[in-house]
Image (cartoon, rainbow, N blue to C red):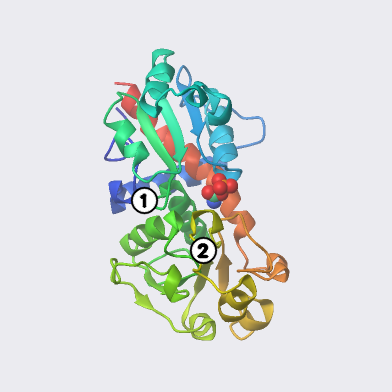
Amino acid sequence: MNKTISKPFLLSSEDLTKEDLELIFKQADFFQTSYKPGDKFEDLKGISVALAFFENSTRTKLSFEIAAKRLSAEVMSFTASTSSLAKGESLLDTLKTIEAMGVQIYVIRHGSSGSQQFLQRNTNGIILNAGDGKHEHPTQALLDNYTLLKHFGTIQGLKITIVGDIFHSRVARSNINVMRTLGAEVKFLGPGTLLPRRLNPWNVDQIDSIEEAIEWSDVILVLRLQKERMNSGLLPSNDEFSDFYGVTLKRISKKPGIVIMHPGPVNYGVELDYAISSYPNCLIQTQVTSGVFIRMAVLSLLSEYLKN
Ligand code: CP
């Protein structure tokens, strides 16, 4: 077997060692520098990949699909709303049914935290977590950190503030682990109702204002308000959130060169001023591009477990 990552699945950022991260970034860089439109690599030739998204997605689903196809996989897309789940079939029976058709790699997004961990215990296939509830989104953290690595040359010593709805964010959870493993210093900024409820489970320092965050940080990672996961009463209004925590061109003009990132989808006018999208150090589109190469790298490395 060629070199690969330490576990035969990717459920959580905690599955990845520093060596795994470096290997994934090296492989992503190989794909990014060598891929030409129309090329097909053969890393997943003869391997079937199922994309099973039980929650909405644009970036993650499409980039996994493009990545798998560029690696010559046979790709099938499973749509929960038109499946036999609607007739009462369980999640596990659904997985077993797809497995019986010969699928070996499953890219799964699900609204319940821990679903992919449960499924991995019940299959011989390889599961990639494409987001589970409020828990983890490991490939998002990989693509965010790969984007930073390409921009700064190193992540060691970077000062990063994650701003917004941290409590509901799987992106924040995965990024804290990956950023710290790579030597960044991470802080939070957000309203008290949208910060982790158990007092500081990750021992992350909090910053008191957006102005202070901009002054301290090399990078601001802005998060969307996840209204779909909120009970009522967590925020007085979007406008008030915007006044206290919104990232605007005027605010960042005090810190030329600061990098702005957002995993998407963005609610412009709430957490981010639309004018930011044309700011040269706004890396949102670069993050999307990185996502394809990171997902090619992860699929390619995990496929080694199917080849011995
Ligand atoms: N960042 C992210 O997960 O976006 P999608 O929900 O569009 O996949």
Q: Which residue is mark 1?
A: 22
Q: Secondary structure at mark 2?
A: loop
Taking 35 as reference, is 120 left or right?
A: left
Category of crowding for the residue at label 2, using alpha-carbon neighbours closer than 10 angstroms: few (below 14), some (14–19), many (at least 20): few
Q: Earlier in the sequence, mark 2 or mark 1?
A: 1
> Looking at the picture, does residue 193 appear above or below residue 68?
below
Q: Quarter of the image holding residue 276?
A: bottom right
Q: How many marks?
A: 2
The disc labelled 2 sits on which kind of residue?
Ser
Identify the residue shown where x is 47% and y is 75%: 191
The residue at the far top in this view is: 101
Q: Position of residue 170 (x, y in %)?
A: 42, 54
The residue carrying mark 2 is 232
Q: Amino acid at mark 1?
A: Glu
- Left or right: 173 in relation to 262: left
Q: Which is nearer the eye, 58 or 160?
A: 58
At 49% across and 75% down in the image, what residue appears?
Answer: 218
The residue drawn where x is 65% and y is 76% is: 248
